[in-house]
Image (cartoon, rainbow, N blue to C red):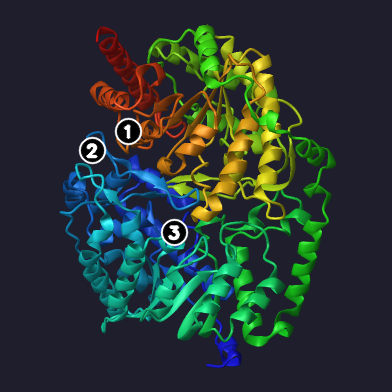
């Protein structure tokens, strides 16, 4: 096909779309089902309607081929485990009794059965359920969901493409099941898994699929020759099937690297590549292998992970370069639009001028359609849209919102000494122990306590004007009093104020810092039914006034025990926001760090002896390629130290991380120079404690003994057993006892019971240690 005919064939498509609905109808239906207010049929009806609405919106916008199978009640990797029959033994009875309840049991656990481990999806803030596999795993085919959703779309008269997690990525994301040797490699199961994928593909073809997309984002990471050989074998076998639809293998989040020649040579029908994250690298690599003659290329030129408008002329030029490198070039976002909010037009509180700079899922869909039209019919066909886009880009570039000379002057004056504590850790530790007087195995929580309906009502009343600021403050003070009272009675050693006043651990701070924009409807799925509204980092950052000091000092006035000051760290403030793309991330991180440094210093001056600066996103934001990591970790760890290094030696600095693969960043954790780190560890059975010990981590640590993402209450014996396992790796003098994460999403009954059990377990093990 000539470049001209390839352009004429250009179509618009997407890989996935936000699942929740405009009013988060899916969240409400699922949580209603869990509470018994919504039955299974009503839940399925809601889900069916949301899928239909999504597909119709996409088709009406001009998307030529809609995705199916990307919709999920909880997580698409969990859906894949169901599709291939990889049900953990402990969940099989529940799944056989009721498939839907069994599905949610795998995701959330029950009082008697632990859930699957949960961790971050590559370098995003989306969480997936980790498959548990072993040498005895037997796969079996269940394509019910995939076939049914394809049928729904086809019944609407739409061209639809099922989207599946690819077999290589599925196995690379998996871990050895409990009781299986830690060195078991799930990839050894590939030959056992491929026949199941072959059956699914045959089922989808029989149901009317012309194309099926197999997502292989794991191949954009550094891969060994054995892993690349596995990818080659997988797509040689799947591509060689006679009873199959056409296969589109998709990668995203980075450059494909050494895997590109492997996939380009495979007997598949097309590749989807990310040209937003690593445009030059993927373009050069594609040219180096001679393009994709006779195949389809889906070019992800619209950034599917950020919310800034696309530079249409730049993207159109890139698309033009790709013509001639494939038989057909189609236009898409760089990844699923799951990672951005639904519709910027719903935002009423953002200045119209600034709103022009933003593109959520519906706006990105329009950009994709515009680019496909321009590629197929020339720039004259989209001349008005190109002119409007140029004006939008110029408006942002010239806005005073984006630059603050005072902030830039302050960051330019940073020295190495600003990011170093005044004394080394051993001297600080001695001063802190003398100052705080804590027992062996001190107990604490991560920060937040349950966000009750009463608290949400108070915030709604304040926004609606039903109560004034004084009335709201009184409600918050009452809640803080109850939280402090409970912690004292439960016997916790280091308390928190509970964060009753905070809507979200990033949004709360963003709303008080200059340079940030807050949305009202910009919801994005984090995991399951947990949705967040990432703020938009649009300009230079500063802190006009203290953000947490009044509430923390009030809480401290209610107790003689230390109350932690609670802040969100600079890397997480970036990772869980939509960041500006017009300056290096490290520069933005320094601006945020200086604003937070002022807050830390003010907390100390107000009498706070323990300050926790959470950085759960440090691992999440780690670049997918090893070559890119040293530069990132250098500025990321510097930003944390810049935040925390202005305090006295006897002020104890904590940090917290959760739901990530910490083994990849143990040295960076060490480089933070925090006095205490708390980490998620319950679902992974204290794996992180072992990783810290292997590294020789010299400071104090609290690997979690209570999995807060499950409604189950851990028993005293269970928490004590995890604590003893932690002691196998970390000496008692340096071990803390705490939950995995904050308690915001939990209810009060389970929180009370779980924390009381946690304290009892700590006392039990403390007594054992004292008597040994």
Q: In this view, does 203 lie to the left or right of 438?
A: left
Q: Which callout, 3 or 2, points to the residue nearer the camera?
A: 3
Q: Residue at x 43, y 44 (%)?
A: 664
Q: Residue at x 49, y 15 (%)?
A: 484
* Distance (Cα) linking label 1 and label 3: 27 Å
Task: Say if 456 sits above or below 534 in the image.
Answer: above
Q: Is residue 483 visible?
A: yes
Q: Name the residue under label 3.
A: 222
Camera-nearest residue between 701 and 101: 701
Label 3 environment density (alpha carbons within 10 Å; few <14, some 14–19, many ≥20): some
Q: Is residue 560 left or right of residue 112?
A: right
Q: Where is residue 581 shown, x and y percent of the image?
A: 68, 55
Camera-nearest residue between 618 and 377: 618
Label 2 environment density (alpha carbons within 10 Å; few <14, some 14–19, many ≥20): some
* Distance (Cα) linking label 2 and label 1: 18 Å
Residue 113's label in the rendered image is: 2
Mark positioned earlier in the residue sequence (2 or 1): 2
The quarter of the image holding the C terminus is: top left
Camera-nearest residue between 463 and 202: 202
Labels in figure, total: 3
Task: Say if 159 sits above or below 431 in the image.
Answer: below
> Tags 1 and 3 in contact by the CB under 8 Å rule?
no
* Distance (Cα) linking label 3 and label 2: 35 Å
Q: Where is residue 538 shown, x and y percent of the image?
A: 71, 49
Label 2 sits on a secondary structure element that is loop
Mark positioned earlier in the residue sequence (3 or 2): 2
Q: Where is residue 416 shown, x and y percent of the image?
A: 69, 33
Q: Residue at x 43, y 69 (%)?
A: 259
Mark positioned earlier in the residue sequence (1 or 3): 3
Q: Mark 1 points at which residue?
A: 686
């Amino acid at each position: 096909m000539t470049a001209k005919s390839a352009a004429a064939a250009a179509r618009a498509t997407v890989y996935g779309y936000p699942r929740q609905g405009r009013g988060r109808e899916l969240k409400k239906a699922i949580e209603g089902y869990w509470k018994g207010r919504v039955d299974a049929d009503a839940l399925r009806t809601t889900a069916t309607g949301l899928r239909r609405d999504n597909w119709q919106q996409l088709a009406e916008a001009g998307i030529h081929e809609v995705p199916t199978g990307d919709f999920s009640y909880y997580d698409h990797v969990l859906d894949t485990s169901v599709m291939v029959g990889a049900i953990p033994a402990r969940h099989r009875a529940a799944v056989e009794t009721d498939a839907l309840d069994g599905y949610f049991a795998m995701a959330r656990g029950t009082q008697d059965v632990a859930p699957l481990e949960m961790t971050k999806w590559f370098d995003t803030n989306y969480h997936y359920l980790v498959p548990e596999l072993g040498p005895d795993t037997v796969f079996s085919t269940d394509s019910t969901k995939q076939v049914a959703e394809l049928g729904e779309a086809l019944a609407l008269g739409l061209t639809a493409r099922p989207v599946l997690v690819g077999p290589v990525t599925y196995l690379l994301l998996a871990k050895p099941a409990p009781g299986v040797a830690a060195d078991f490699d799930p990839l050894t199961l590939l030959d056992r898994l491929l026949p199941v994928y072959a059956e699914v593909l045959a089922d989808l073809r029989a149901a009317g699929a012309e194309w099926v997309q197999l997502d292989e984002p794991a191949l954009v990471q550094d891969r060994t020759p054995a892993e690349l050989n596995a990818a080659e074998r997988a797509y040689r076998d799947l591509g060689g099937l006679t009873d199959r639809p056409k296969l589109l293998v998709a990668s995203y989040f980075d450059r494909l690297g050494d895997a590109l020649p492997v996939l380009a040579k495979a007997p598949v029908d097309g590749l989807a590549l990310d040209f937003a994250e690593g445009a030059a690298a993927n373009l050069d690599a594609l040219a180096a292998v001679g393009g994709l003659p006779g195949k389809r290329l889906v070019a992800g030129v619209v950034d599917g992970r950020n919310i800034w408008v696309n530079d249409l002329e730049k993207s159109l030029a890139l698309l033009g370069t790709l013509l001639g490198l494939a038989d057909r070039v189609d236009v898409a976002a760089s990844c699923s639009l799951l990672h951005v909010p639904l519709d910027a037009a719903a935002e009423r509180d953002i200045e119209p001028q600034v709103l022009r700079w933003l593109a959520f899922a519906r706006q990105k869909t329009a950009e994709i359609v515009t680019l496909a039209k321009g590629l197929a019919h020339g720039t004259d066909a989209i001349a008005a849209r190109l002119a409007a886009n140029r004006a939008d880009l110029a408006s942002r570039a010239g806005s005073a919102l984006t630059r603050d000379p005072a902030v830039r002057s302050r960051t330019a004056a940073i020295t190495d000494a600003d990011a170093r504590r005044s004394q080394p850790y051993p001297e600080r530790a001695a001063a802190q122990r003398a100052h705080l007087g804590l027992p062996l195995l001190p107990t604490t929580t991560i920060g937040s306590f349950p966000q009750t309906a009463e608290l949400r009502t108070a915030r709604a009343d304040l926004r609606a004007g039903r109560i004034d600021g004084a009335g709201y403050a009184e409600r918050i003070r009452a809640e803080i009093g109850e939280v402090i009272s409970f912690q004292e009675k439960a016997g916790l050693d280091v308390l928190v104020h509970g964060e009753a006043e905070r809507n979200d651990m990033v949004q709360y701070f963003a709303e008080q810092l200059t340079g940030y924009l807050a949305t009202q409807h910009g919801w994005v799925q984090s995991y399951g039914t947990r949705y967040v509204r990432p703020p938009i980092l649009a300009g230079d950052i500063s802190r006009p006034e203290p953000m947490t000091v009044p509430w923390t000092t009030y809480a401290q006035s209610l107790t003689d025990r230390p109350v932690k000051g609670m802040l969100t760290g600079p890397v997480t403030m970036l990772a869980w926001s939509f960041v500006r793309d017009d300056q290096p991330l490290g520069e933005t991180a320094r601006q945020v760090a200086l604003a937070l440094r002022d807050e830390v210093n003010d907390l100390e001056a107000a009498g706070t002896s323990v300050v926790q600066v959470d950085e759960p996103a440090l691992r999440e934001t780690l670049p997918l390629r090893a070559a890119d990591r040293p530069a990132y970790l250098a500025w990321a760890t510097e930003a944390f130290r810049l935040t925390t290094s202005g305090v006295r030696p006897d002020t104890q600095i904590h940090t917290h991380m959760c739901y990530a693969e910490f083994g990849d960043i143990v040295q960076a954790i060490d480089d933070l120079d925090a006095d205490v780190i708390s980490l998620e560890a319950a679902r992974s059975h204290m794996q992180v404690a072992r990783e810290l010990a292997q590294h020789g981590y010299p400071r104090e640590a609290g690997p979690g003994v209570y999995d807060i993402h499950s409604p189950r209450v851990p028993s005293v014996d269970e928490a004590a057993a995890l604590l003893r396992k932690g002691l196998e790796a970390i000496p008692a003098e340096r071990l803390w006892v705490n939950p995995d994460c904050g308690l915001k999403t939990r209810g009060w009954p389970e929180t009370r019971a779980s924390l009381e059990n946690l304290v009892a377990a700590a006392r039990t093990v403390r007594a054992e240690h004292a008597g040994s």
